[in-house]
Amino acid sequence: MAFDFGLKRIGVAVTDPLQIIANSLETLPRKEIFNFIKQYCTREEVEAFVVGYPFSHGHAENEITRHIEVFIAKLNELYPDKKVTKIDESFTSKIASQTLFLSGVNRKQRHNKGNIDAISANIILQSYLEMKKL
């Protein structure tokens, strides 16, 4: 299960049991994420969590990274048996916007941040799956 963490919303993506392809699942208000994860984990097998992280490439930590670290700490506390991996989320929102544009989605849907967050989570998870294959 992967997350594109935002201060207002969190995009969520999951993969198939064979871990071949990522699928956008949902975009949720931040305050609802842990209830969603709990419910999802009771219905489905979740091996690990993947969290998009804005690696700043030598720059100081920014506001969002502090919130992401709190989110990761809570995941570790609630699910100590599941690995949490940070994946560089650089440019995922831009790629998600481009994906929506190229797929012919109308302008209103392209600018819907919820759609962008869900696709960004998908990109983050797919990057993780590709990295695991190496």
Image (cartoon, rainbow, N blue to C red):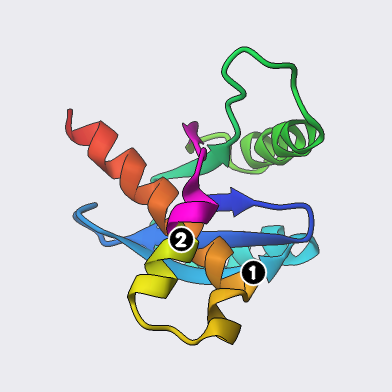
Q: Name the residue under label 1.
A: 113
| Pointer 2 local density, CA inside 10 Å: few below 14, some 14–19, many at least 20 | many
In the picture, residue 30 is in which quadrant?
bottom right
Q: Residues within 10 Å of mark 1 (few under 14, many from 20)?
A: some
Q: Can residue 110 be seen in this view?
A: yes
From the top left corner, tell me how far across and down residue 17 is, in percent: 24, 59
Residue range of the region highlighted in magenta in the rendering: 84-95
Q: Can residue 2 be seen at all in this image of the molecule?
A: no
Left or right: residue 60 versus residue 134 is right
Describe residue 130's horizontal placement relative to residue 63 as left or right: left
Residue toward you, 104 or 48: 104
Q: How many numbered badges does the structure rendering display? A: 2
Decide whether residue 126 is among the magenta residues: no
The residue under the point 82% across, 34% down is 63
Task: Give residue 61's position: percent from left, percent from top.
Answer: 74, 22
Helix, strand or loop under label 2: helix
> Which circle marks residue 62 in the picture?
none
Give yes or no for contact between labels 2 and 1 (Cβ–Cβ under 8 Å): no
Asked if residue 90 is among those painted magenta in the image, a careful observer would answer yes
Picture coordinates of residue 20, whole percent (x, y): 19, 54
Q: Kindly identify which numbered label has been placed on residue 96.
A: 2
Check the picture and name the quadrant holding the C terminus.
Answer: top left
Which residue is found at the position 77% from the left and 29% from the top?
62
Marks 2/1: CA–CA distance: 10 Å
Q: What element carries label 1?
A: helix
Task: Name the amino acid, label 1.
Answer: Lys
The residue sitting at 42% across, 73% down in the picture is 101
Q: Which residue is drawn at 49% across and 64% down?
A: 97
Residue 112 % position (x, y): 62, 76
